Image (tube, helix red, strand yellow):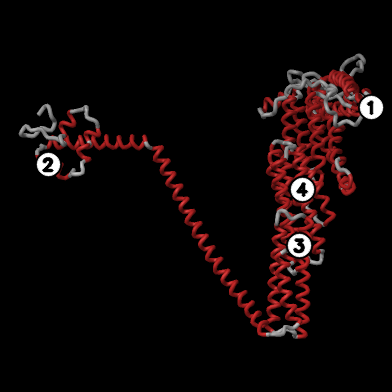
Amino acid sequence: MENSPFTTPRGSSSSIGNAGDLEVNANLTLSDKLRVFKSSTFDPNAYVATKSRSMNEKEIRHLCAYLVDLKKASAEEMRKSVLANYSAFIRTSKEISDLEGELLSMRNLLSTQAALVHGLAEGCQLSSLITGNEDSDMDYILDEKTDLSKTEKWLIGYLETLEVLLAEKRVDEAMAALEEGEGMAEEISEQRTLSGSLFQALLDAITEHRQKLADQLAETICQASTRTAEIRSTALALKKLGDGPRSHTLLLHAHQEKMKRSMQSLESTSSGGVGAYTATLSQLVFSTISQAASDSLTVFGEEEPAFTSELVTWAVRQAEQFAVILKKRILASTAAAGGLRVAAECVHVCLSHCYLLEASGLALSPVLLKYFKPFVEQAMNTNLKRIEQTSAALAAADDWFLAYAPIGRNSSALPPVSSLSNLTSLQPKLSSSAHKFNSMVQELFEDVGPLEVLQLDGLAFEGLLQVFSSYVNLLINALPATAVTENLEGSGSKIVKIAETEPQQIALLANAILLADELLPRAVVKLSCSTRGDESHRRGSDKQQRLPEQRELKKRLQREVDHLRDSFCRQHALELIFTEEGDARLNALVYLSLDGKEEQPEWFPSPIFQELFAKLTRVASITTDMFVGRDRFATVLLMRLAETVVLWLSDDQAFWDEVETGPTPLGPLGLQQVVTFR
C-alpha cells in the first residue's frame, strides 16, 4: 500500500487503466497516459464506477487531485499546440475570410448582372414593341395606299435622312433637318396634306430626334478631348435646340473639368519653387474663369440674368477652391513659420491675376481676401514677435556704443547715395541691437508693402508701435536706476546689459530718437510706395487718407521716446539732488545763513547748481559728438534735463517750509540767491 497510492483495502492495486501505473511510471509521455481515453470504446461513467467501487475515501480524493492535475496538463498541452500552430491558424482564418468576401462579391456581381440582363431584355422588348407598332402602323397605312402623295414620299425620305444624320453625328445638318421638319409640320398642319396618324408620327419623330441630338451634344461637351472652341460651338448648338440652362451648366462644367486635369498635371510635373507653383496655378485658375466668362457671354449674352447669376456663383466657388488649395499647400505652413515674404508674394500674384477679371465684371478679390488675410496676419504677428525676441536677446549683450552699420549689411532703409561721405552723413550711428531692430523692421515693411490691398496697414502700424515700445522698455531697463528698481520690485523684466557710463546712457537715447524720428518713418513710407501701375493710380486717394495716420504714428513713436528721455532725466536729476547715502544736497541753511555774515558773500552758484552746470556741460559735449548734424536733439535733451531738476526743486515742499518757518528769517542776500536759483 505504501508503494501505490491507489491500493484497495484487499491489497490489490487500482488503476486508471492502470492509473497507479501511470503515476508511478514517470517515463510515460502525456500522449501515452491519455491513450486510454482516446479509445472509441471508452465509457467514462463505467470507467469511474469501476475504479471508484474498489477505492476508499483517501484514494478517491487522490484520484480527484490527480485528474485535476491531468486537466491542467492537458490544457497546457493544448495551449502549446495552439501557439505552435498559431501563424498557420491565423493565415488560414484570413484566407477563409478573404474567400468569403470574394464569394460575396461574386454573388453581388452575379445578382447585378442578372438584374442588368433582365432590364436590358425588358427594355429592348418594350422598345421593339413601340417601334414595331409605330413602324407597322406607318407601313400599314402607306402599304394600303397604292399611290403615295408627294408629302408622304417626303416623310419617308425625311425620317431616313434624319436617322442617318444622327448616326453619323453631323450636327449642323441634323439641326437644319430638324428646322426643316418643324417648318414642314407647320405647313402640313395648315394644308392637312397628311393623315392624323402620319402627322403625329412626324411630330413624335422630330421630338425624339431632337432629344437624341441634345444628348449627343451634351456628351460631346463632357468629353475630355473636346477643345475649347468646340465646347463653345457645341453649347451654342445645344442652346439653339431649346435647352439653354443645361447648355450653360455643361459649359461651366467642361471648363471646370479641364482646369482640374491641368491642375493634376501641374502637381505631377511641377519642379519649381513656391512662387513658380503659385503663379502657374493662379494663372491657370483665373484664365479658366476668364475663358468661361467669355464663352458664357458669347453664347448666352447678358439677356438672361439666371445665366449671369450661375456664372458668378460658379466663379466664386472656383476661387474658393483655389484659395483652399493654396492655403493647405503653402499659406498655412508658411504663416506658422513666419514666412511673410513668401506669403506676400503668393497673395500678390493671386490678386494681380484676380484684378484682371474685374474688366469682365467678376470681382473675386473679396473671396481671396477672406481666406488669405488671416494667414498673412499670422505671419506678420510671428515676425513682430521675432523682432521683439531678437532685440531682447541682443540687448542682453549690447555694449551701448554707437557705430555705423557694417558695410555688407543691406541698408534698405537708406536712400541711394553716390559717395561714402554722403553715406556717412545719411546713415546714423546706432548700437548693435538698434541696428538689428531697424533692419528687421525695414525688411518687415518691405514684405508687407505689396499687401496694401489686404488693409494691413493698421495692423502694421500697431505692430510697429508694439515692438518699438518693447525695445524702448529694454532701453529704460538698461538705465542703472531703473535696473535697481526693477530688481527690488522683482518684476520679471527681460535681462539687459546696464549702461554704466554717461556716454552709454546717452547712446540709449540716441537709439530711440534716431529710430523714431528718421528710420522707422522710412519703413512706414514703404507702405505707400509699394503699389505700381494701375494699382497705384487706383489707390492714390487711399494714400492721401493715410497721411494723417502716419503723422499720428510718428507722434506716438515720439511719446515712447519721451518715456525714455524722462527716465534718463529723472535718474540724473536724482543723482544731483541726493547723495549716494540718500541725503539731500539742497539745504535751506545755505540760503538762510547768507545774511548773518559780516562780509559780502561771493556770488557763486550753490553746489547743487554747480553740479548741474557740470553735468549739462558733459552731456552737451557727448550729445554734440553723437548727434552730428542733429543739434535739435541735443538741445531738447539739455532743456529737459535742466527742467527736470528745477521742477523737482520747486516741488520740494520740505525745503520751502524750512525757508519760510526756519529759525532764521530769509534775508535779502539769501532771497537773491534763492530767486536766481544759484
Taking 563 as reference, is 584 above or below it? above
Sooner in the amino-acid sequence: mark 3 or mark 4: 3
Q: State which quadrant residue 157 falls in.
A: bottom right
Q: Which is more N-terminal, label 3 or label 2?
A: 2
Mark toward the start of the polypeptide (2 vs 4): 2
Q: Which numbered dot is residue 235?
A: 3
How crowded pointer 1 is (Cα within 10 Å; few <14, some 14-19, many 20+) is rated as few
Decide which of 418, 94 is in the foreground and name it.
Answer: 94
Return the residue at label 4.
Answer: 284
Can you identify the residue that label 2 sits on? 50
At numbered mark 2, what does the secondary structure look like: helix, strand or loop?
Answer: helix
Residue 137 rendering spot, x and y as whole percentages: 63, 80
Tell me how far mark 2 sits from mark 4, CA to CA.
Answer: 95 Å
Q: Secondary structure at mark 1?
A: loop
Q: Which residue occupies the foreground of this view, 423 or 99?
A: 99
For disc 2, the neighbor class at 10 Å (few under 14, some 14 to 19, many from 20) is some
Q: Which residue is mark 1?
A: 418
Does label 1 or label 3 sit earlier along the sequence? 3
For discs 1 and 2, the disc positioned in front in the rendered view:
2
Which one is in front in this view, the residue at disc 2 or the one at disc 3?
Answer: 3
> Which amino acid type corresponds to the residue marked 1 in the rendered image?
Ser
- Kindly give the residue lying farthest to the front in the view shown: 146
